Image (cartoon, grey):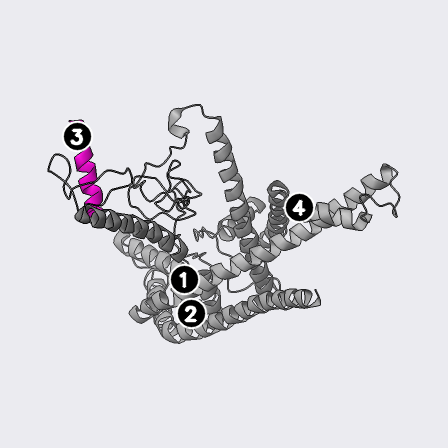
């Protein structure tokens, strides 16, 4: 017993250690990726910024200082250049996006699959690196979300179980059951443990708690964004939180992109990181729970439909097919062998029997047939072949068959007879068809 408890503790520590190692791997992966992208893309960003500054300076000198006549085509070209520079974040009021802090933000949006789009690789090498970098990073981040979901659900289940146990104790006290009373020779603690072992938290309560958590994070983050970001009202901040937390990432609103803020820039960026990580984790967990609720609703709706197309059809019998699961046992209808012994539980003469699995012949997606099922099916095939060999041997010697009458090597009509295994089965079937005709 002590060994089992020790193994449970070690297993719990191993799971937590795996989660911590994954966090360290993601942090290292993001830092290394940010350093690489900064080295590859920074020079291109500086060139584009310098090119835009020269165009803007030339435009000011020509049409503001010298007051030259402004052409419409020149104005449209300048507006296009400004729009491109604003999109790339190379204007004066935007912070650099290809330095180390900017690329950390960039690779974080890549691995988390948010992808705001305000920063993208500008060089061919950077785009090739993004393809190689994104796949393992996104996979590790999704694994992190799954492990986070496991711990969140475990924590919620533990809290709900404690509340349920406290509720049971209050009910016992209200019913006047003493704490030292025993029922069926068991103490009250053992009875409560038995009740709690079969208890599972409701998915709807978990859904409610996740909605509350997401709402709290969204409200707090929106209040911060509204006060720090320029030209953002509260609804714009809520809209950004949903787009970012749900990893939709349109990119029309992006936080922490201005060059200067009235508040502490480092504190604001850290708070922004915490909001994004916690929001994405909670929304991802909410997605999984909502998918369970939707699946339950669909199952309930299908049960309520009164139409034949919604009923499950039994699978058609398959001859000589290997099916997973336990094979159906059958008897040979009271027949006995030559030595008078009862035949085996599997009737080898029933070649057309449908050996259905426990799941009515259906196999879950990705499930492969086990070696046990394969050997069991082959055992039936070997028994059929042995029987055919025995009958063929008796026919060749003119020995009496099971009915006591002698059989020639051919059938009574001189057609379709003999053979071993599958050929014999086919001949028997054809012979039966010919006799019916």
Give the mark, 3 or 2, whose residue is nearer the N terminus.
2
Q: Number of callouts in the render?
A: 4
Q: What is the chief secondary structure element of the magenta stretch? A: helix
| Mark 3 crowd level (few <14, some 14–19, many ≥20, 10 Å Cα) | few
| Label 3 to label 2: alpha-carbon separation | 86 Å
Provide the secondary structure element on which disc 4 rests: loop
Residue shown at 54% from the left, 50% from the top: 283
Residue for badge 3:
435
Residue 47 falls in which quadrant of the image?
bottom left
- Residue 401, percent across and down? 26, 42
| Mark 4 crowd level (few <14, some 14–19, many ≥20, 10 Å Cα) | few
Residue 92 in the magenta stretch? The answer is no
Residue for badge 1:
119
Give the mark, 3 or 1, whose residue is nearer the N terminus.
1
Q: Nearer the viewer, residue 193 or 360?
A: 360
Residue for badge 2:
98
Residue for badge 4:
198
Give the mark, 4 or 1, whose residue is nearer the N terminus.
1
| Segment colored magenta | 421-437
Would residue 70 be seen by someone viewing this image from the given angle? Answer: no
Q: Tell which tag, 2 or 4, sits nearer the viewer.
A: 4
Q: Where the C terminus falls, by quadrant?
A: top left
**In the figure, 173 relative to 33: above or below?**
above
Side of 164 relative to 116 (left or right): right
Residue 84 falls in which quadrant of the image?
bottom left
Provide the secondary structure element on which disc 2 rests: loop
Q: Are marks 2 and 1 in contact (CB under 8 Å)?
A: yes
| Mark 1 crowd level (few <14, some 14–19, many ≥20, 10 Å Cα) | some
Give the mark, 2 or 1, whose residue is nearer the N terminus.
2
**In the figure, 292 relative to 150: above or below?**
above
Residue shown at 53% from the left, 68% from the top: 22
Q: Are marks 2 and 4 in contact (CB under 8 Å)?
A: no
């Amino acid at each position: 017993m002590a060994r089992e408890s020790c193994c449970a503790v070690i297993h719990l520590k191993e799971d937590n250690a795996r989660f911590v190692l994954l966090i360290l791997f993601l942090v290292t992966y993001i830092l290394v990726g940010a350093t690489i992208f900064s080295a590859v893309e920074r020079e291109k960003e500086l060139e584009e910024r310098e090119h835009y500054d020269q165009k803007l300076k030339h435009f000011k000198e020509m049409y503001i200082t010298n007051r030259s006549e402004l052409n419409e085509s020149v104005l449209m070209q300048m507006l296009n250049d400004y729009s491109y520079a604003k999109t790339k974040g190379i204007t004066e009021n935007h912070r650099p996006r290809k330095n180390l802090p900017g690329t950390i933000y960039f690779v974080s949006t890549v691995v988390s699959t948010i992808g705001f789009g305000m920063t993208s690789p500008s060089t061919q090498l950077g785009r090739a690196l993004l393809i190689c970098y994104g796949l393992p990073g996104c996979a590790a981040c999704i694994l992190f979300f799954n492990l986070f979901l496991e711990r969140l659900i475990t924590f919620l289940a533990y809290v709900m179980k404690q509340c349920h146990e406290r509720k049971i104790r209050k009910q016992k006290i209200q019913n006047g059951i003493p704490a030292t009373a025993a029922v069926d020779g068991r103490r009250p603690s053992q009875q409560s443990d038995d009740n709690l072992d079969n208890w599972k938290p409701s998915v709807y309560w978990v859904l409610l708690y996740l909605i509350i958590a997401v709402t709290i994070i969204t409200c707090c983050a929106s209040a911060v964004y509204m006060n720090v970001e320029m030209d953002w009202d509260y609804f714009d901040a809520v809209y950004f939180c949903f787009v970012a937390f749900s990893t939709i990432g349109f990119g029309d609103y992006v936080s922490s992109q201005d060059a200067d803020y009235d508040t502490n820039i480092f504190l604001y960026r850290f708070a922004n990181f915490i909001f994004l990580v916690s929001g994405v984790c909670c929304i991802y967990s909410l997605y999984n729970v909502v998918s369970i609720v939707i699946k339950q609703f669909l199952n309930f709706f299908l049960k309520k439909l009164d139409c034949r197309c919604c009923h499950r059809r039994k699978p058609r019998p398959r001859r000589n097919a290997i099916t997973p699961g336990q094979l159906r046992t059958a008897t040979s209808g009271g027949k006995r062998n030559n030595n008078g012994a009862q035949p085996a539980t599997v009737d080898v003469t029933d070649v057309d029997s449908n050996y259905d699995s426990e799941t009515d012949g259906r196999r879950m997606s990705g499930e492969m047939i086990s070696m046990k099922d394969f050997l069991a099916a082959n055992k039936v095939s070997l028994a059929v072949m042995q029987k055919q060999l025995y009958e063929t041997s008796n026919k060749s010697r003119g020995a009496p068959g099971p009915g006591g009458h002698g059989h020639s090597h051919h059938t009574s009509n001189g057609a379709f007879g003999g053979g071993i295994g599958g050929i014999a089965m086919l001949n028997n079937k054809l012979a039966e068809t010919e006799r019916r005709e």
